[in-house]
Every structure is written in C-alpha cells, then in structure tokens.
Amino acid sequence: MQVLDKNKLPSNEYKKKLCQNYNILQLQSKTENVNGYEDFEEPVKNFYTNFITNHGNLETECKQNGPKCCRDVNYYIDLVTGIIKESKLEVSEKNQLIEYVETHLEQTVRAKNIYTCERERDLDSIRKRCILQHLYDLKEDDNFISSF
C-alpha cells in the first residue's frame, strides 16, 4: 500500500521553495516558550531574511503564476503572524512583531512588481484566504491524490 507523502503534493512546490533552508516549525518551537521580545525578534528576522531570498529565487516562476505565488506568500505571512499571536509576549510586543512582518515582508514582496498580490488584514479576509488556499491546493493535488 502506498503512503501519501505530503511533501510531494504539487500544491507544496512553491511552499517548499519559499521556506527552503528554513523549517517553519523551527520558528514555532523556538518561540513558543519565549517571554521576551528580543528572543522572539531574532527567529522572526531570520525567517524573514531567508523567505525574501527564496522569494527572489522564484521570481521567474511567480511572473508566470502570480496568483499561486500570492496565495503561498500570504499563507506564510498568515502562519508567522499566527505564531506570533499565540506567543507569550505582551500584546504590544506581539503587535510590534506582526507589524514588522506585515510591513517588511509584504512590501518587499510587492516592491519587485512581479505580480499583483492583495492582502487584506481583517479576520474575515484571513479566514477566506485560508479556505481558498485549501480549495486551490485540493484542486491542484486532485490527480496526485487520486492515484492512491
């Protein structure tokens, strides 16, 4: 019996490249018991630096498939902001880190004019993005999953 390897799903192609050389679960584990802003800031900035480099490496592919890149970029921005929101930091420190991620990461990705990528920040938009991401991924993975 074959086992489904989620890493081989077609929908994960860009996601793997966006976080190449950086495990997002590592960010979560390094920050889940952190109480101080400075201890949280470094892993977030390391993620940011790596993510921007990887996004730059995907520039050609993103020009050809902008909506997919946009969904995957937003997925990671939402994931990182979710990790920050679940942390033990003070609310003001959480907001400061979230602002850093959203302004720096979002602007850097958009600054290259590679593709149009909208990002609403309200809770309903985040929920919609999450649901749409899963639906698009499911559609993209349909043939691959059907072979099991």
Image: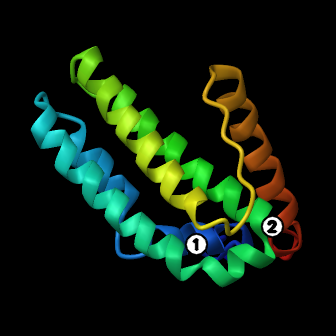
Residue 19 placement: quadrant = bottom left
Pinpoint residue 7: horizontal percent, then vertical percent: 58, 72
The correct choice, above or below, for 123 with respect to 143 in the image is above
Q: Quarter of the image containing the C terminus?
A: bottom right
Give the Cα separation between the discs numbered 2 and 1. 11 Å
Pinpoint residue 3: horizontal percent, then vertical percent: 64, 73
Amino acid found under the numbered disc labelled 1: Asn
Residue 15 placement: quadrant = bottom right
Pinpoint residue 17: horizontal percent, then vertical percent: 53, 75
Determine if residue 1 is in view.
no
The residue lying toward the viewer, choosing from 8 and 92, is: 92
Residue 25 placement: quadrant = bottom left
Residue drawn at x 20%, y 43% is 41
Amino acid found under the numbered disc labelled 2: Asp
Disc 1 is placed on an element classified as helix
Numbered badge on residue 87: none
The correct choice, above or below, for 83 with respect to 13 in the image is above
Residue drawn at x 75%, y 57% is 116
Q: Would you name the residue on which mark 2 appears?
A: 141
Determine if residue 103 is in view.
yes
- Image side of residue 56 versus residue 86, left or right: right
Q: Would you name the residue on which mark 1 appears?
A: 7
The residue lying toward the viewer, choosing from 132 and 92, is: 92
- Image side of residue 68 versus residue 79, left or right: right
Residue drawn at x 44%, y 36% is 81
- Within 10 Å of the Cα at label 2, are there few (<14), some (14-19), or many (20+) other Cα atoms? some
